[in-house]
Amino acid sequence: MTITARSKTLRDETCIKSLGRISDQRTVREGLSICLERARIMTDVFKETEGEPMCIRRAKGLAAVLDNMTLFVRDRELLVGCFSSSEKSLPTYPELYWRWLEKAVDNLPDYAAMLSPAEKAELKEIHAYWKPFSIHGRERAYIPPGRSWRIGDFISGGWMWQWEISTPDYKKILRKGLYGIIEEINEKYEAVAADISRPTRDRMRQMDELKAMKISVDAAARWGLRYATLLELHRQEETDPLRCKELDRMISVLSQVPSGPARNFHEALQCFILITFIINYIDQPQVGNGIRFDEVLGPYYEKDLADGLLTPAQGRELVEAVWIKMQEGGYVQPPQWVNNGGGGLGFQTITFGGTDSEGRDITNALTHLGLEVTGDLQTIAPQVAVRIHDNTPQSLYESIFRCVRTGCSQPAIFNDNVNVPRLTELGAALEDARGYSINNCMQPVIPGKNIHYRAGHSGGFLLPMCLTLALSGGRFDIMQGKLSGKRVGYPTPDITEMKSFKDVWDAFCMQVEYAGETLTMLANIADELLREYIPRPFLSAILEGNIEKGCDMRDWEFLGLRHHLVFGVNNAAEGLCAIKKLVFEEKKLTLDAFVAAVEANYDGDALKILNLINERVPRFGNDDDYVDQITVEIMRTVKAVCGRSIDIYGNPYVLDGTTASAPIGAGMILNATFDGRKANEPFHDGSISPVQGHDTAGPTATIRSVAKVKTRESGNLLLNQKFMPEFFDPKHYPVMAGYLKTIMDLGVHHVQFNCVDRQTLENAKLNPEKHKDLIVRVAGYSAYFIDLDNRMQDEIIKRTEQRF
Amino acid sequence: MVENNSVGTIFNIQPFSIHDGPGLRTTLFLKGCPLHCPWCSNPESILAAIQVKLSLEKCQQCGICVETCAENALTLDENQKPRLDISCCNQCLKCVESCPSGCISTIGRKTTADTVVSELLKDAPFYSNTGGGVTLSGGEPLAQPDFTAAVLAMLKREGIHTAVDTTGFGLQGHLDAVLPHTDLVLFDIKHLDYERHRQVVGVPNDRILENLKIVADQTGFWIRVPLIPGFNDDIELADRIVALGKSTGAERVCFMPVHRWGEHKYPCLGMPNTLAGIPGFPAKRSQAFQDHFRHMSDYVFITGG
């Protein structure tokens, strides 16, 4: 089946919010603007509520936005929802950040074009209020001299203040409606209010928290009704009888949800969209989603089909409508994150497959339908993940391959045999672990459970830089590319004192340790600031345990999954490998000469050293233990450092390898490294993928290399493989299913397939206008190829094609 | 594993093959072939000895290689870059070491059966999950019978499905050594006419057709036919080959339209480019075969094109 004409029109007319560089020409999509409504309303509320408890102020702020924001309905759409005043605009969040945005609209034409002069003046006025309060900026007071987060020092990262991931209990919302949740809040409130034997401070705080939840949940329920009212106005003006019928149905749907329980598939999908938009775009920018789409919504779909309330074609069009709504999402991103976030997008991931809490497969009709729509619609959002386990039916493998073959680079495939035990090891109950889903960053979350990822500060171990610092005594001058100058890392010994590979390795480990300390300090400051200043009463109310505890979601942690990211492990491993082999074993060059070559960016005479590296140094991804074991050791080291890093709730950090395209972005601004990578070339993507073009021994050897890095001994790791479309021809499904099963048997956490031929990519680079729909998987997410920076395009072209 | 020091010459181990037998396979390419098919897409497989290959992108036009070559197999062309003539080359390989720019490399390596088998076993989990295994191809595996038999026997001991891709041109004794360890033979039939076969491929086909019967008696096999325009691409001949497959008990017959991906290899190897004289296989013709055998689509397969 193909998508309906309506879906096609809506999809084509949707303004892609990606802030990717369009073939190096722009940093912002043309026609995209900033909507100040949210920021304006929020600011007014904060001015009016000074002195009130922060949770109440936040709740009143959200309520005022939901009550007063402009609503719109797109032409002929079946599911409604919005987060700014037009489909071509994005809100901003001045309580979280202002400085980079102000700089960007002042200095960068693409950003400046997102606002009229009057709006720009208003934005500055809004910012003027928030300057002392906005949490991005407050951290500066708490960072000691000599420690820094900047890219180029030794870690990569930035103050995002906008990544946070938790998945509400959609099943409960659909079952009870928001009014049902308000009843729960009321009950708890009355109990707390009456219980004056409680410690007074606790009692007062809990009453405030519960009151804040009630204010915000009430507002969310009213929001749906505002939409019903708006649709009635459209209905009065509508002349097409078919559309009138649709509008009648939509009015009925929005009169019911999200305030009341969802009675059918249409209501369930509409409720899901509204809740998702509130928590991910209106309340706070939150990447993630993490709904198990088939598990939560499949029963509604199957029941409606069985009861004759819905035809398969109607059901399919509603799913298409959800995908288009997801495609509408997006955030204004800091300019320096345009590469890191790749094409940028709404960052919402929907999960399919897997098991129920008893371990039984949950594949249903909606699983197949969702994958089919993903392949047919060719949108970049939502990101789609599929869980594979021992009893995944063959039919689901086939749906996966059909989807991959369309060239949409979806879905990402996850291994239950790794994820479930890993979550139980981290402390989740087995039943909960079996219910995991995948968030946008390709991390496992447990739907409905209290927040387990925050990333106010998003940073990670930039491992190739740790190696550089190990050979510079912790000094680095990014402007000159010199391994000297300002001290930015740990003062490890001078290279003249390094007599063996072990000396280099030890210095490297010290730099990793120092990076870990700094990262942890920064991340914990960020988390404390979020806890203090950005409570989230609405999301708290729809996550398990907060009503019961009478507290905000930020007051506790369900599971210790606070993470540090890793970047460029294989670049670092190959650099260490080059030093081990060429300097200490074969004595083909001295450390001094090697450092000089790196400083010279391997140009001039240093080219000989680059040739030596390329000819003699084993590369990760070819099942060669010499280098693979260095990767393994690095990951163990980083994992141990993470284990010693404690988050603000007292849990150790975990290592996370789901860095989107940040390694590529980071590589683009960093100097040459010891693996033979020249300045500004990307690092390898996907945390454990081989360095681009270095995997020459075929896909199975790559899998064997990757499998050595045990996820449970390290962290989430992401492998990208690129295949020719021929591979996913139906006649090869059994072989491909076996291939995928083997990857899972070998304990690989997560694999993604790009399925497009090199010729197409090369053509698209030359003629972007002819390839607007071409989607590629970058690293954890899909993006339109033409939106990617040229260098990133080259990187994708270079990624080894797996041929037969 | 029982050690086996039987030595063979191979030129490639190709993991992830899906056209050389069932499931996901690793194909081991052996060097040396008694046939000289002009359409060969792996011309590096023909010579049994380790040979040299030029890659001239990095050539500095220093001429050292030409001075090194005592046989005049290397001469300078009009761009002062070396040109190789394999008919003069005695595979002394001295030029490889002499080149300061790394433009001359070798193709092929000698290896023992146990070394290569431990390499092939690395993908064992992939074979078992996909119903795949290992295929020995070439060159001609029967041309290195001891090595081939040793590798196959060791794989069988490890429970791996084995296939042999052969021209069918070999001595009966060699077949007898190899077949007991072979689950599937991919048996090439190029033409049924004795004289046409001899003219084009360099050897007659009588022994090949005899060997087909021997294979048929001992193991499962597929018949594979490279389709070459103007040589064997007529439907009537195809029908006769399919009938031969049926009568001998072949599990399937595969027609494989010729492709030209190997053409660039000939000059690098100093070999006359015989593939240049072979026209591409038109998609229309391929479709005609598809249509003709549509009623037998579970027996006759037409790949690629």
Image: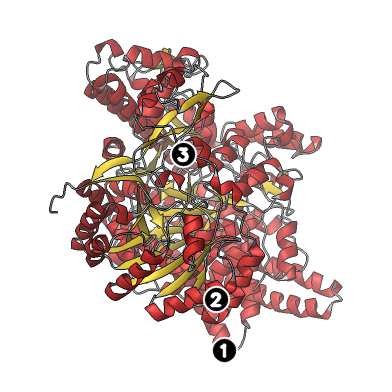
- Residues at discs 2 and 1 in contact (Cβ within 8 Å): no
Compared to residue A769, the image places residue B52 above or below, namely above
Disc 1, SS = loop
Q: CA distance from mark 1 to mark 3?
A: 54 Å
- Tell me: A190 left or right of A796: left
Q: CA distance from mark 2 to mark 1?
A: 18 Å
Specify the color scheme.
Answer: secondary structure
- Tell me: A327 left or right of A418: right
Of the image marks 1 and 3, the number of the one nearer the N terminus: 1
Front residue of this view, candidates B8 and A41 = B8
Q: Percent position (x, y) of residue B23?
A: 38, 65
For residue A248, which quarter of the picture? Answer: bottom right
- Is residue A680 visible from the viewing direction of this image? no
Q: CA distance from mark 2 to mark 3?
A: 53 Å
Specify few, some or many for label 1: CA neighbours under 10 Å numbering under 14, 14-19, or 20 or more. few
Numbered mark located on residue A693 in the image: 3
Which quadrant is the N terminus of chain A positioned in? Answer: bottom right
To which residue does mark 1 refer? Answer: A307
To which residue does mark 2 refer? Answer: A261
For residue A113, which quarter of the picture? Answer: top right
Q: Residue furthest front?
A: B195
Amino acid at circle 1: Asp
Numbered mark located on residue A376 in the image: none
Amino acid at circle 3: Gly
> Which of pointers 2 and 3 indicates the residue nearer the eye?
3
Amino acid at circle 2: Pro
Disc 2, SS = loop
- Return the chain for callout 3: A
- Is residue A151 visible from the viewing direction of this image? yes
